[in-house]
Image (cartoon, coloured by chain):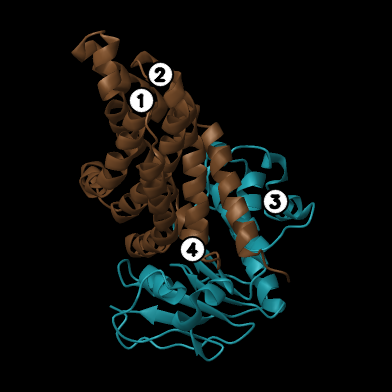
Amino acid sequence: MLAGVSLTLAAAQCLHVLGANGSGKTTLLRVITGLVTPEQGRVEWNGQPTAANRDAWHASFSYLAHSDGLKPELTARENLAFEVGLRRPLVEGETEEALREVGLAAERDQPAGFLSAGQRRRLAVARVLLAAVPLWILDEPFTNLDAAGTTLVAALIGRHLDAGGAAIIAAHQPPAIPGHAPWRLELA
Amino acid sequence: MAATSAFQAACHAYRRDLVLAFRHWGQVAQPLVFFVIVATLFPLALGPQLGELREIAGGALWVAALLASLLGVELLFRADHADGTLEQMLLCGQPLAVLVLAKGLAHWTVCGLPLVLLSPLVAAGLGAPTAANGTLVASLALGTGILSALGAIGSALTLGLRRGSLLLGLLVLPLAMPALIFGARAVDLAVHGDSARGPLLLLSAMLVLAMTLAPPAVAAALRISAE
């Protein structure tokens, strides 16, 4: 799997990884993040192998996985505060602003376990947003989202790219990011 | 943008696990209730003669504490693994060993500390003199810390396995034997009015060793389990 795959991503660029089920989209993303160690090959960030300074590499991106990575017992606000707080100190009102941006202002004090699958996905996107990192690695970010949610997340990705960020998106459908045409990597 | 320091991240991880534990009181109480029940089985099986019970009090309390610790430590990473927050922790850019140490401390606070505080009461039921309570509390405070560290290694190694509980016991119990030997011996010496300084110092050394070596081992095991 992933033999011969080679790619370079620059600032303000978006890569859309697509392919049939089992073609290795998630595996590629997990290899890039460092969660999976490849048998051969390497991942570089700013010309340096990511394996050489793993913590610095991890601090450079935010990963939205298949599972939302939320604690069902914690409220939406607590989930953001605890998860993002591991990365950077949050300023008063930042979590509320992020929740408002993803349309969860009213649900801020609801436990994540009480939210719908789509709302949990929005909350996970808010975590990516708050991380304030140059690279977003998103695995099926539009899963469980309604039409409005899909448009919203695409717009947030577009805003991130406009600000000079980069994104790698694994999705079956081409993401409609306003003002950006992602280049495609199709896995066999 | 300023990044969270490793110490601040550890405080976050510690606080988060405490909040989660207080929202799951049932899970927190389980090891404690188990400790009391196991310790209570000895008088029921051996008879109510306090003289006889006093002789086995140290061993009985320590075996009960060991089994109760094993029960609690299984849950240390399982929920995080299931809901994906473990992956987020692996990728948050902080030294994983430091976060693991914070999680271990949180686990000890909610599972080990109540057991230590309750132990004089349970010891009284086994006929242990109140003069031995100081040694009992000290030995269990050190011992539950060692058991939490050893348990964390076992829990991380068996994380992705379907029947991990049994394997966890098989992995951790042999490693916990030195702590059990010295811990039970310390209580036994105190029950008989002798100085327990030697075994307690050995337990302290074991705790320092466990707290130093376990976090990197757990971090490595978690990375393997996450693959």
* Residue A80 position within the rendered picture, expressed as x and y whole percent measured from the top left: 64, 52
Q: Amino acid at mark 4?
A: Leu
* Residue B224 position within the rendered picture, expressed as x and y whole percent measured from the top left: 33, 64
Q: Which chain is cyan?
A: A
Residue lying at 33% horizontally and 25% vertically, measured from the top left: B192
- Which colour denotes chain B? brown
Residue lying at 46% horizontally and 67% vertically, measured from the top left: A171
The answer to whether residue A115 of the structure is visible from this angle is no
Q: Amino acid at mark 1?
A: Val
Near mark 1 (Cα within 10 A), the count class, few <14, some 14-19 or many ≥20, is: many
Snapshot quadrant of residue B218: bottom left
Residue lying at 55% horizontally and 64% vertically, measured from the top left: B92
Q: Which mark is residue B129?
A: 2
Q: In the figure, is residue B137 to the left or right of A76?
A: left
- For label 4, the residue is B96
Question: Circle 1 marks a residue in which chain?
Answer: B
Q: Which mark is residue B191?
A: 1
Q: Mark 1 vs mark 2: which is more N-terminal?
A: 2
